[in-house]
Amino acid sequence: MATEQKIPRRGFTPAEFERRTLRAQKIMDAHGFDALLLTAPPNIRYFTGFDTQFWESPTRPWFVIVPLEGAPIAVIPEIGAPEMALTWVKDIRTWPAPVPEDDGLSLLAATIGGLKRKHGRVGAEMGREMALRMPVADFLTLRQRLGSAIEDGSPCIWEIRMVKTPAEIDHIHYICGLASDAYAALPAQISMGESEREVVRKLRIDIARRGADATPFLPAISGPGGVAQIVCGPHDRAIEEGDILFIDTGSTFDGYFCDFDRNYAVGRVADEVHRVHEALWQATEAGIAAAVPGAKTDDVWRAMAKIIDAAGAIGNNVGRLGHGLGLQLTEPPSHRLGDGTLIVENMVLTIEPGMEYAPGKMIVHEENIAVTKDGPRLLTKRAPRELPVIR
Amino acid sequence: MATEQKIPRRGFTPAEFERRTLRAQKIMDAHGFDALLLTAPPNIRYFTGFDTQFWESPTRPWFVIVPLEGAPIAVIPEIGAPEMALTWVKDIRTWPAPVPEDDGLSLLAATIGGLKRKHGRVGAEMGREMALRMPVADFLTLRQRLGSAIEDGSPCIWEIRMVKTPAEIDHIHYICGLASDAYAALPAQISMGESEREVVRKLRIDIARRGADATPFLPAISGPGGVAQIVCGPHDRAIEEGDILFIDTGSTFDGYFCDFDRNYAVGRVADEVHRVHEALWQATEAGIAAAVPGAKTDDVWRAMAKIIDAAGAIGNNVGRLGHGLGLQLTEPPSHRLGDGTLIVENMVLTIEPGMEYAPGKMIVHEENIAVTKDGPRLLTKRAPRELPVIR
């Protein structure tokens, strides 16, 4: 029952946060930023270690400033102060939110205004794969009010977060192992005729039992020989002889995600399905092998696309063949022609080849890896080469 | 074990979506908007019924346009098209996201540009208790590119969503009942000496077993006679004799949240705790009774504040005494002096009196109600007047 991997220590040492911040400040300086203005949960957690499920409530904005020198500054609602005080952040400024007339904006402007100026620019979460967690109207007011320019800090933030620390990789490895075991145990728990929804409920409970903190992402879909999409569901459809049952999960441990799928054959599936499954298993092998320091994301894409194309792919509505992961289910880079990201040591990536082999029949595989100087290191337990069967 | 309430039909009829849209269009016209531009999951789901856990991936923006006449238009990544086609939305326009160079922006601009113009203004999620789920840089580009002005549509959107339909209330009632039963069953499942984290894991599994789809919010905290905050945790702290164990949950059924807490005495707690608990129980009664059509949120606040103050409150870092809920854990209005929202039939509200009665010792109660023309209707099963005891 229990996953036998060693449970990583929760949280990170103040020394790790200090190292993260010092490295970030070098990158910020190169990007010409005096500070980063952070509002999104993964960015705030990356620099402070602050954890709350209260992000689910959009009522109050929270801010963290990473200055070019010194430790991060938290500008947050009073409701969060006792917990923020438990982190390594010592400069905590609060207001009694919610205050619709001025929900932290003056306090935030004064805090940024008090920073040392070198470049005259502040980086904010304005770009790709990020959303600003504050009212845009307030953000525009802040922009007008500040002496410094607020510009898109997302390339800078992604340069910082795309490369993981060893402790971050340990976290991801743990949740990957735990979800791998749950996937492997699933066929023994479910039967033909059960609904996708019931299957997902059992898996959700098993993942929680094994030690995941949360499972924000657990789509499941089934269909004869393949599925039409891989991001929605479960529905009430009963799994039937000849189906592929596709399940994906982003579960978390201490804030860090796994993101990988598994496919199951329900009873006897068509020979063609076994052929496509084998091609995707081979494409995954090729994708993993290609993810080495010095390669580009385009190379990883090419290694997989070659095999998928040869196997007769007619499409793939996912738009890419894998991506980064960490504090988010999906992060840059993308394995995609034209992405052009240089792969370096300590990136964590999904390898996700998929193909539609007949109209409405798609199969997608996925594994998670860490890039090491000695080559790729599998964080998930590799999917079985033969499709597991549900009877 | 099972919750005995009837499970509501999942989803809503096309007729309900049509009624929601027609009502929204009247409100939009009064606000002077030709269209609403929606990017946030709860807003998209409200108008389309589209459900996905894929919102967890911030890589691709999704857009829905609600025009002043006719049905909503979806402008979405190809990956979402098969599922959107299952909703009542018929006009679905897609692009092969992710495409960093133009991630749906041209398609979105063309779609908005093609709408009939009456007011020359488009409402977007720029204001309170909402976050725009797209890169702000893209939003600013869109704003420059469009012939119509893009302005803050959030007061308009909240006027639409703040009043629920009977089917929405049924959904909330169901998840409230289910979580109530899980809370009631908890003391029999846990013991003194267990950690907050283990307690939460058991409750999370039980809530899933009883039929919740997900539990995005399940903070727990314990402390001698009260707690310092109510939005973070669990931690590894073991619950001890004399503690208050506080647990809150936002669990969901078919997209709709409950949001209420429960308090437990661990062994024997101080007499003062019983006194404060009784005052909060009375404050809850008063808050519920005050939430009638024609009253204002300020009145609900006053009804509770009077009792809390008389009981010797020295503070409350929550900043309000309850709020709206529905497709979000927290929504407008706020029970708060100065909020001034008129309470009308079919609002769903939390009644959430809380007080710090000694430094670092806070107790907070919470129930969920629907406002009916005959008065408040409890959706949760009322917390016991005597603190349940964990031994």
Image: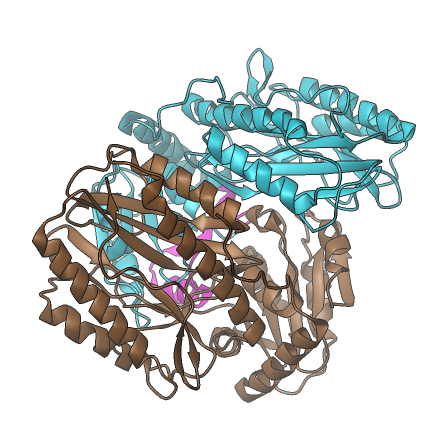
Chain colours: A brown, B cyan
The correct choice, above or below, for B306 with respect to A310 in the image is above
Residue B143 magenta: yes
Q: Is residue A75 visible?
A: yes
How many tags in the picture? 0
Q: Pick out the residue farthest to the top.
A: B374
Residue at image position (44%, 21%) is: B166
Segment colored magenta: B127-156
The answer to whether residue B39 is left or right of residue B314 is left
Residue placed most toward the observer, B161 or A83: A83
Image location of residue A133, percent across then percent down: 55, 57
Q: Is residue B34 visible?
A: no
Q: Would you identify the image quadrant in which residue A220 lies? A: top left
The answer to whether residue A343 is left or right of residue A34 is left
Image location of residue B18, percent across then percent down: 30, 30
> Which quadrant, please, contains the C terminus of chain A?
top left
Image location of residue B240, percent across then percent down: 80, 40
Residue at image position (23%, 54%) is: A387
